Amino acid sequence: MNSIPILVLLHGTRLTGAQWTGYAERLADVAEVRTPDLPGHGRRAHQAFTLAAAVQTVESVVAAAGERPVLLAGHSLGGFVAMSYAEQHPTRLGGLALMGSATEPGGPGAGVYRLLARLWALAGPARMQRLDARVLGRLLDTRIWAAIQAEGEYFGAVDAAWSEVMRHCGSHQLRHVACPVLVLGGRWDQLHLQARRFARAAPRGTVVTVPGRGHFWPMTHPGEVATQLRRWIAAVQPRSEPHSAPT
């Protein structure tokens, strides 16, 4: 039986699995990477976004893994979807990694999410797409940005997605998750502000905060994030010799 774990990577708002371009090659020797599109995005653009539908998307990928170990990681919106899956299946995963999704959407940090939602609404899809081309086109890894452009951006699901997150998601979802939980983010990431709170909520939570990096870190410096994921995979996977968790 193939014992290499399956690593499911969930994308952020308005994007698709294209945001993880290059990760499969970087991690090929330690994991088999899967990058599904969430409802309302990419190949599932026809499907309305709800957390229930997003969790079902993850369930289908996990079910296809059979008996193989599954690790689940998500960035931004994808992190909250990953949390929601883990809350409903607290013993199924071998590891859970949350990137840029550790600020309470319904607590003291809710203002960050309301501000983001207001900015999206005021700007509108056409203006946001132009802004992305101007800003993300300069910031992101060139290969990832090219893949995102090829797959397209999906602004229609933004309001529904973050409304769902603000109603249902938060650190409380981690209380009964049995697997190791990595809360990973950049020091400048506004959605990583309560990382320690999220890690404390999980029975086996760990925080890694990297100086000088922001919310788009997985796409601006994919090599760095892949290295962090590699360390995490080594820590959570059974080995003949013990590995230390990243600090």
Image: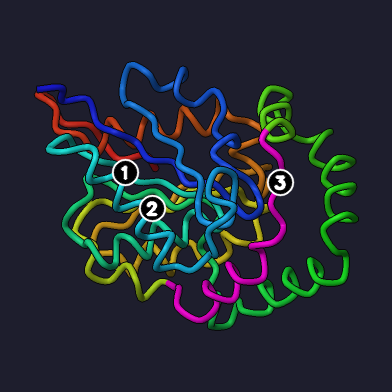
Dot 3 lies on which element? loop
Front residue of 167 and 98: 167
Residue drawn at point x = 44 percent, y = 73 percent: 170
Dot 2 lies on which element? helix
Residue 90 found in image quarter: bottom left
Q: Which residue is mark 1?
A: 61
Asked if the residue under mark 1 is in contact with the one under mark 2, i.e. CB atoms within 8 Å, the reply is yes
Front residue of 34 and 209: 34
Instruction: Tell me the kind of residue under disc 2.
Output: Thr
Residue 57: which disc? 2
**Which residue range is magenta in the image?**
151-170
Q: Main secondary structure of the magenta part?
A: helix
Dot 1 lies on which element? helix
State left or right for residue 214 relative to residue 176: right
Instruction: Tell me the kind of residue under disc 1.
Output: Val
Residue drawn at point x = 90 percent, y = 41 percent: 134
Front residue of 166 and 183: 166
Q: Which residue is mark 3?
A: 153
